[in-house]
Image (cartoon, rainbow, N blue to C red):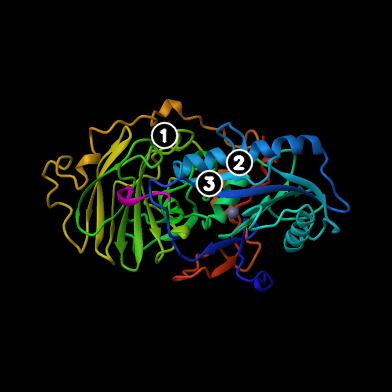
Amino acid sequence: MKTSALGRIALVCGVAALAGGIVPATAHADDAPVKKKILPVLVEFSDSTFQHPDQVKASTPDTYFGTKTDSVASFFKEMSRGKFAYVPAVKGQMAGPVTLPLTAAGCNHGKINTLTQEALAKQGLVRGEDYDSLSMVFPAQKTGCAWAGLATVPGPYSWINLYGTASGLGVVGHELGHNQGFGHQGRAMCTDGDLVNCKDDGTSAKSIMGGGGPAAGFSAPELIRAGWLFGSEAVKVAKSGTYNLRSLHGEGSGTRALDIPMGEDRLVVEYRHAAGTVDGRIEGVHAYRVPKDAYGSSSLIDLTEENETAGNSAPADADAVTALTDKASKVSLKVLSSGAGKASVKVALNGESLAAEVSDDSTKKAVNPEHTASDTDAGDGASAAPVPAAGSGTEAQSGDAAPAAAGDSADLAATGAGPGTLPLVAGGVALVVVGGVIVLGRRRKRA
Ligand SMILES: [Zn+2]
């Protein structure tokens, strides 16, 4: 598939695009949220219209801006902990339907985009002035698009190939994650405990970008990429020591991620625990490899064969790490404690021994003592977190594309050029289209 016509735009979901690693300059913690005006627009073709237009018109503002926790606006507010907000670009919250002078067949997303913007301009709506992001929702019946959603990585455009009457957070939240610069999150299996020998295998299931659906939220590398962890919330580890973590999405203040140098890559460590609407099925300390500084292209480091996905009933901590080593960069870590909303992790750099200092009272000697045992964990209660059942309702989860037993590789059916290996693009928004797919649109076929 050629990208030249699209310039520096990368398209994902139909094809997985992985953005190179530029971490955007971010605001400070006290700033008002970064607001992005998003315009959902209903689009119809000269030969294909919505089968239930009234229902689509009613559901769309709800999907993007509804006050319930399953709207896109609520999701991004929760995931950024108030640092980012999608806001309506127009009073009615959406535009359209507009009818394009274009037939549906051929799934010409570029043309759909151009013609939609032309139609909006006739209504006085101009991108960059009246709206920042454009989300085009159109009937799927005749398009032949191989995807339920497509998006630029990063960028302002998303396309929703709508089956049924509502887009849902599972699809739109995932696409807008791409707009934030997040690629698909894979899983690297390193079953011997050393990170030198790892094998790419499936998806992380720890993020809506990795087949986890909205119930998984975003992972720590993605929050770092988006600029949603500030200062000591993501500690850049420069020396060996013991570090305390609070749950990634929990309330309160404190360190939520460790960002550890690992050769040319980074090792990002988080502690996950039920919080708000997410992580009801994720528990424990998880680790990710970030290639170069491409925080949007991380992979879960998994030391076990077992994989907790949206489609199985593996224990919530099935993919949690207790200890790992990267012999190549002489980095190792050990989880000293984990549970009930917090964790303590010992990190050894430069080949230093994990055993040293472990006999100390690690909690009191912690590098961030102000963030330890005395913190409350309000909002982290496991019982408070609703867990949408896989495959039910309108919240498509990426993992729904294929039965879990078939393996995650089934979710990554190639539609482009070759297997979905992660291109490592140092510095730059160089965008690459590869063949990975996380199919989001087949949920209705599963009971
Ligand atoms: Zn995608």
Q: Nearer the viewer, residue 24 or 289?
A: 24
Q: Nearer the viewer, residue 138 or 279?
A: 138
Q: Counting other residues with Cα less than 10 Å from the Cα at mark 2, is it few (<14), some (14-19), or many (20 or more)?
A: many
Q: Is mark 2 within 8 Å of ligand 1?
A: no
Residue found at x 36% / y 29%:
378
Q: Nearer the viewer, residue 158 or 432?
A: 158
Dot 3 falls on a residue whose secondary structure is loop
Query: Which stretch appears magenta?
Result: 228-234
User: Which residue, as the protein is rendered here, is positioned at the far bottom?
Assistant: 4
Q: Counting other residues with Cα less than 10 Å from the Cα at mark 1, is it few (<14), some (14-19), or many (20 or more)?
A: many
Q: Position of residue 104 (x, y in %)?
A: 82, 55
Q: Position of residue 270 (x, y in %)?
A: 35, 47
Task: Return the mark for residue 285.
Answer: none
- Residue 75 part of the magenta-drawn span: no
For marks 3 and 1, give the CA distance: 15 Å
Residue found at x 44% / y 48%:
219
Q: Are marks 2 and 3 in contact (CB under 8 Å)?
A: no
Left or right: 336 in relation to 86: left
Residue under numbered circle 2 = 169
Residue under numbered circle 3 = 208
Left or right: 187 in relation to 149: left
For marks 2 and 3, give the CA distance: 10 Å
Task: Say which amino acid is labelled 3.
Answer: Ile
Q: Nearer the viewer, residue 63 or 127?
A: 127
Quadrant (top left, top right, bottom left, bottom right) of the N terminus: bottom right
Task: Say which amino acid is labelled 1.
Answer: Ala
Among the two numbered marks 2 and 3 on one chain, the one whose residue lies closer to the N terminus = 2
Residue under numbered circle 1 = 274
User: Which residue, as the protein is rendered here, is positioned at the far top?
Assistant: 383
Q: Nearer the viewer, mark 1 or mark 2?
A: 2
Is 21 situated above or below 40?
below
